[in-house]
Amino acid sequence: MEYIFARTMEVQQLERELASESEALQKNVKSLHTPTLMRSLKRKVQLINWTLQLIELNPNIPNPGVEILIDCKIDSLETELSDAQSPWQSDRIFNEIRSLEWILFMIKILHSSMDRFIW
C-alpha cells in the first residue's frame, strides 16, 4: 500500500513564509552584539523550526491543526510562566509565548489571504 502525502497550498505557503523568516532572522543574529536580543532571536528561530517540523512530521495537517498545536504549546508555557522563579525565567518564557503568537498571526494572515483567491 502506498501513501501519498499532499500538503495544501495554504500549508505550503506557510512553510515558505516561515522558512524565509527563519533565514532572515539567522542572518540578523550573526550581526548582533547584544546577548539578550541574540538569545531572543535564536529562540524565535528555534520555535519557527519547531513549527516547520510539526508540519513536516504531519504532512496532511491543515493550518487549523497547526494552530491548535501551537495553542497547546502556548498554554503549557503560560502555566510555566505562572510558576517562574526569577525575572529572567519569566522574560524567557514570555518571549517564547510572544514568538508563538507571532507564528499564529502568520498562519491567520495566510489563511485570510488564501480565502480571497478561492473562487
Image: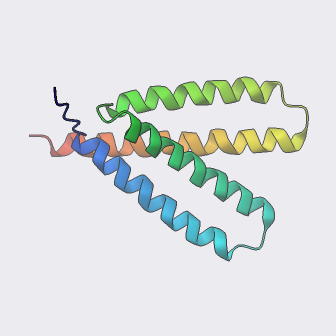
Indicate whether 83 appears above or below 16: above
Residue 83's image quarter? top right
Residue 9 rendering spot, x and y as whole percentages: 22, 44
Could you tell whether 49 is left or right of 119 in the image?
Answer: right
Pick the front one: 34 or 46? 46
Could you tell whether 81 is left or right of 117 in the image?
Answer: right
Indicate whether 85 appears above or below 119: above
Residue 75 rendering spot, x and y as whole percentages: 62, 24
Residue 89's image quarter? top right
- Residue at 65%, 58% (x, y): give it: 41
Exactly how many numbered labels are in the figure? 0
Residue 16 rendering spot, x and y as whole percentages: 35, 55
Q: Residue furthest right?
A: 86
- Residue at 42%, 61% (x, y): give it: 20
Regarding residue 105, the answer to whether it shows in the image is no
- Residue at 76%, 44% (x, y): give it: 92
Q: Residue furthest bottom?
A: 31
Image quadrant in which the C terminus is located: top left
Residue 54 rendering spot, x and y as whole percentages: 45, 37
- Residue at 79%, 64% (x, y): give it: 35
Could you tell whether 16 is left or right of 77 in the image?
Answer: left
Could you tell whether 110 is left or right of 86 in the image?
Answer: left
